[in-house]
Image: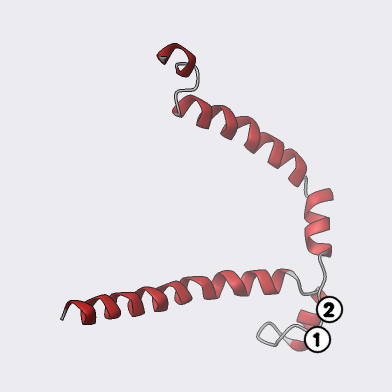
Amino acid sequence: MNKLRTGAFHTGMILLSLLWLGPVLWVVVMSTRSFDDIAAHGVGSLPRSFTLDTYRQAWTDGGELRALINSMLVTVPSVALSLGWPRWPRSR
């Protein structure tokens, strides 16, 4: 009985993981398609072209570099403080 419950649990978790990963994979695939490919063949079709121009455009024109720097300026000190970094040398 325990093996059956464990098997059912793992099967359920695999299905739930696939259900969660489906939209994530869809977004990644759609982000690597060109606009012309999507316009010509539709959103639901398989990709016929591969491009990283959308990422390049977001990085250069959209100001993603500045957003990354701002995120790092907030995240790194916050994690260091939450881990107790200033107290660590005195705790020994």
Q: Position of residue 15 (x, y in %)?
A: 40, 79
Q: Which residue does the image show at 45% across and 28% down from the upper left?
A: 82
Callout 1: SS: helix
Q: Are marks 2 and 1 in contact (CB under 8 Å)?
A: yes
Quarter of the view holding residue 63: top right
Quarter of the view holding residue 7: bottom left
Judging from the image, the colouring scheme is secondary structure
CA separation, marks 2 and 1?
Answer: 6 Å
Residue nearest the observer in this picture, 51 or 44: 51
User: In the rendered image, which residue does mark 1 sit on?
Assistant: 40
Local crowd size for mark 2, using a 10 Å CA cut-off: few (<14), some (14–19), many (≥20): few
Is residue 78 rendered to the left or right of residue 1? right
Q: Which mark is residue 36?
A: 2
Q: Amino acid at mark 2?
A: Asp
Residue lying furthest top in this view? 90
Q: Position of residue 19 (x, y in %)?
A: 46, 76
Residue nearest the observer in this picture, 35 or 75: 75
Q: Position of residue 53 (x, y in %)?
A: 84, 64
The image shows residue 36, relative to residue 80, as above or below, that is below
Residue nearest the observer in this picture, 87 or 64: 87
Local crowd size for mark 1, using a 10 Å CA cut-off: few (<14), some (14–19), many (≥20): few
Quarter of the view holding residue 44: bottom right
Q: Which residue does the image show at 49% across and 24% down from the upper left?
A: 81
Callout 2: SS: helix
